[in-house]
Image (cartoon, rainbow, N blue to C red):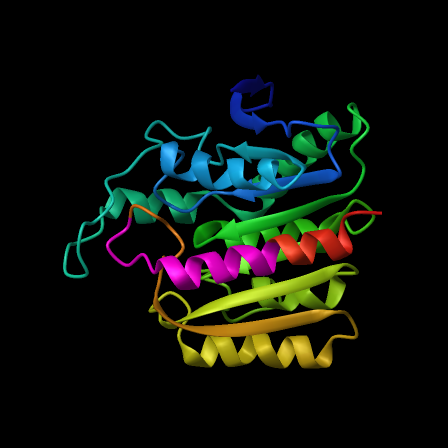
């Protein structure tokens, strides 16, 4: 765990190094519950695939940075978690991304992929649209709040991406319902780049191994898709 200096105070970043010289870099964008061992384990898998992997704490500006995870579908979400999600703007995520990219560049890593889970998906997408010369691929897994009214809707950033894109949707997802999934698919169709979307017969959050909704088979399938994306687009 390394502390990056920011205008808003230190930002903790978990960095995972592969066992041999990295073939590229990966930035993992967290979900709304905050950094925890579960996420660190998921990030470590990208390092095991050969990538120098960064997991920044996007909540570093907030007083509360960790929230309880529901243990069943009916359990209520902490309203403070929703507020933290909303308070962590896309502009903040981009500022944090710039610091990670600078650190990676200082170590000779000039091509990276981004992967975001839930809340992190929109940050991963915006990073690819904003830093197209460095971020060669972005993966968005069961992303929430990806579509809203207005020109600043995250899905509209697809048009600015020059790298490869992959979206993995959950069939049952209130944070990205079917009309939002269709809007993203339409944006991919209108875009001239290399992108794909896949709908999984799962619940929102199915990739997390410690969640009630975890689907091991589908989670592994999605992980393999993301690693394959990075192997194609990030590795020179």
> How far from the left and from the top, in percent, is residue 197?
58, 72
The residue positioned 53% from the left and 40% from the top of the image is 45
Residue 179 visible in the snapshot: yes
The residue positioned 79% from the left and 29% from the top of the image is 105
Q: Is residue 149 above or below residue 35?
A: below
Judge left or right: residue 89 versus residue 159: left
The residue positioned 32% from the left and 56% from the top of the image is 214
Residue 163 found in image quarter: bottom right
Judge left or right: residue 213 versus residue 137: left
> How far from the left and from the top, in percent, is residue 25?
70, 38
Taking the magenta stretch, the answer to whether it contains residue 228 is no
Q: Is residue 54 above or below residue 122?
A: above
Q: Main secondary structure of the magenta part?
A: helix
The residue positioned 62% from the left and 81% from the top of the image is 186
> How far from the left and from the top, in percent, is residue 176?
42, 69
Residue 125 visible in the snapshot: no
Which stretch appears magenta? 211-226
Taking the magenta stretch, the answer to whether it contains residue 223 is yes
Q: Is residue 204 above or below residue 12?
A: below
Front residue of 220/13: it is 220
Front residue of 90/102: it is 102
């Amino acid at each position: 765990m390394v502390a990056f200096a920011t205008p808003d105070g230190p930002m903790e970043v978990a960095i995972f190094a592969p066992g041999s010289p990295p073939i590229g870099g990966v930035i993992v964008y967290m979900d709304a519950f905050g950094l925890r061992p579960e996420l660190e384990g998921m990030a470590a898998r990208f390092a095991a695939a050969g990538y120098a992997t960064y997991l920044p704490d996007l909540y570093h500006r907030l007083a509360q940075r960790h929230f309880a995870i529901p243990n069943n579908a009916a359990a209520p979400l902490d309203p403070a978690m929703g507020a933290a999600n909303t308070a962590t703007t896309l502009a903040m995520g981009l500022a944090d991304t710039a610091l990670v990219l600078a650190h990676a560049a200082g170590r000779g890593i000039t091509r990276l992929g981004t992967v975001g889970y839930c809340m992190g998906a929109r940050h991963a997408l915006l990073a690819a649209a904003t830093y197209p010369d460095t971020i060669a691929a972005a993966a968005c897994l069961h992303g929430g709040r990806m579509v809203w009214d207005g020109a600043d809707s995250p899905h509209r950033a697809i048009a600015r991406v020059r790298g490869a894109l992959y979206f993995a949707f959950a069939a049952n997802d209130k944070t990205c319902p079917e009309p939002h999934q269709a809007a993203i698919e339409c944006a991919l169709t209108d875009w001239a780049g290399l992108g794909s979307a896949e709908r999984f017969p799962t619940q929102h959050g199915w990739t997390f191994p410690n969640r009630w909704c975890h689907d091991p088979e589908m989670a592994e399938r999605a992980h393999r898709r993301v690693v394959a994306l990075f192997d194609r687009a990030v590795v020179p």
